Amino acid sequence: MGSIPSLEYATANEVTAMVLLAPVLPAGFGADITELEVDPETMYTPPLERLKPLFWSEVSDDESRRYTSLFVPESPRAVLETTRSLCEVDTSKVRVPALVIAAGADDLIPPQVELLADAINAAFLVLEDQTHGININPIWTQVAEKIQTWLSRLQLPNTTR
């Protein structure tokens, strides 16, 4: 859900670079609705048996149990807004080098992610056969390398302290 606040921040603030992993789409991108049964009055927890296939499909069963034990309920409003692309962001105001990385087998994020990448003039990468939890699945090291390569091509000033 971090893409929406990141995009909104970038509309009004100077940002050096932005990477969006499996981003939620703002309103206006023709996104398909992700159907989840969400009671707007109760914190949302997805059915536990859906967590592994949705988020960390590539990890061992032991790792999956560990990640599942760490999962906490989420705001029903946030879940509804993100799964139905209800948040408004004026993406025409996003003027920052960006990399959008989509998960090809993501059942939470619709395939219109490339439209977002186009709207903010971002580099776009699809990780075929990957689910929403890119940073949890074993591919994360390869993704980190791709991000590092992309950042190094930007020739940003060194801000290491």
Image (spheres, helix red, strand yellow):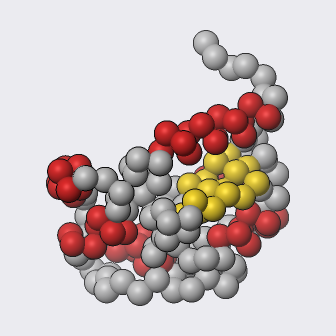
Q: Is residue 72 above or below residue 35?
A: above
Image quadrant where residue 56 sits: bottom left
Query: Relative to 62, is 160 above or below?
Result: above
Q: In what quadrant of the picture does the C terminus appear? A: top right
Residue placed at 69% from the left, 80% from the top?
Answer: 28
Give the percent coordinates (x, y) of residue 155: 81, 29
Which residue is the extreme one toward the top? 161
- Using the image as rendered, state which of residue 47 and residue 126 is in the foreground: 126
Tell me residue 157's x, y (percent).
Answer: 78, 23
Rendered image quadrant of residue 128 = bottom right
Image side of residue 41 versus residue 17, left or right: left
Q: Residue 126: percent from the left, percent from the top?
A: 63, 62
Q: Work out whether 153 lies above or below 138.
A: above
The percent position of residue 89, horizontal first and vertical second, equals 68, 67
The reply to whether residue 70 is visible in this rendering is: no
Task: Please indicate whether residue 58 sits to the left or right of residue 134 in the image.
Answer: left
Q: Nearer the viewer, residue 138 or 83?
A: 138
On the rendered structure, is 153 left or right of 73? right
> Is residue 133 among what the camera can see?
yes
Instruction: Tally the marks.
Output: 0
